[in-house]
Amino acid sequence: MNILFVSWDSDQTNYLENLFFPIFRGIQDRRGWQFHVMQFSWAGPAEVERIRSLAREWGICYRHVVVHRKPAAAVGAIWTMVQGRRALKKYLQEHPITCLMPRATLPALMVNLLGGWLQNKGISIVFDADGLPIQERVDFAGLKPGSLQYRWLKNAETKMLARADKVLTRTNKAIQIHGQSLRENDPSRFYRISNGRDPGFFKPDPEKRAALRKELGVAEDGLLWIYSGSLGPPYQPQDMLRLFWSYQQLHTASRFLFLVREGTDLKAEIPAYLEELVWIKTVPFQSIPDYYSAGDLGISLRKPAPSLAGLAPIKVGEYLLSGLPVLLSDGIGDLSQELGGEAACFVYNDNTTELHAWLSSLKPQSKAAARQVGMEKFGLDQSVNAYIQALDSLQAH
């Protein structure tokens, strides 16, 4: 089987090499199938070449298509989709692709534009619905329900959900929501997959832990809070700082480390009384597991919103595999059901007293418990197996 994965990205995404390339390589090794990736983005030539080189190392065929941003982003996007349809069709004519895998809404729209041509070619479609991206735009990006843009995107998503041979989601809640939007719901078409991480890369490292805690100046009995990833209102930075301060006043050796790409905005939000207690660092991806090893607690908070039902934050698996107990918000995808009963995880529901009691209960052995949960639920093998199950069923179909 030759599979073409199609994505639409900005100029600064790294999820291909950090998430999908390892999964695709694992599938290739297990099944001998060949993955191709067509990435639409407005990244510069150097970034495109970097990704192309990484894809080559992973044994994945890579093609980049420029997303136009002029005369305005919206106009450029529409023009890109018109051109993208042609680029996609040309690629399918030139390569023996048997399965097309659009990720999220805009790639789905381009695939929809190919109409019956794909069916005549006998090319199967696996739609990576990727959470609830349209609802996420409503919740956090100002998209108005009922607006022309909303109806345009929703129509494209619904059409793809209906016509795809298989649909991949990150949560069972997303499967239920998508099913409700369709007049007929065939549960056998839907597969829940995980954002698996490599347990050989994300793992505790006692030597790195000792060295980095010494470098950072964290006391042996200090609880080092870790947050890694994107920032902005949806990620509740003020709530993170508030919870940390409430704990730090009782446990003064505690510190908070943010691992982010750009920390200027966050720095402006940190009150003066926390400036010496909260650190912001930007480090290469390869160094992230070292800092996880230095930590004692991983944070994954999200502002309540309907779109959270479709989310499966990648960082949760990274934290757990690295031996970090996790503090997470209630209502994120299936995590409350999956992790709520685990001693290494705490689902926060505005009860600070319970949170403090849980934090005080954490022991050195909590790291082993966290690692075990990560291995069982968020390892790379779990993702590879889930994808293979979906694709195997496609072949059987």
Image (cartoon, grey):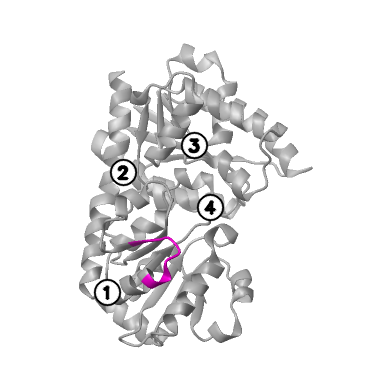
Across the whole image, how many numbered discs are drawn on residues?
A: 4
Contact, mark 4 vs mark 3 (Cβ under 8 Å): no
Binning the other alpha carbons within 10 Å of mark 4 as few (below 14), some (14 to 19) or many (20 upward) gives: few
**In front here: 38 or 223?**
223
Tell me the kind of residue under disc 4.
Thr
Q: Earlier in the sequence, mark 1 or mark 3?
A: 3
Give the quarter of the figure containing the N terminus: top left
Residue beneath disc 1:
361
Q: Is residue 78 above or below residue 94?
A: below
Mark 4 or mark 1, earlier in chain: 4
Q: CA distance from mark 4 to mark 1?
A: 37 Å
28 above or below 298?
A: above
Task: Please report the bounds of the magenta region as a residue range.
Answer: 346-353
Mark 1 → mark 3, Cα distance in angstroms:
41 Å
Type of amino acid under label 1: Ser
Find the distance from the CA under tag 1 to the CA under tag 2: 32 Å
- Checking the image for residue 5, the label placed there is none
Query: Which mark, residue 103?
Result: 3
Do the numbered discs 1 and 3 sit on residues whose CB atoms are within 8 Å? no
27 displayed left or right of 110? left
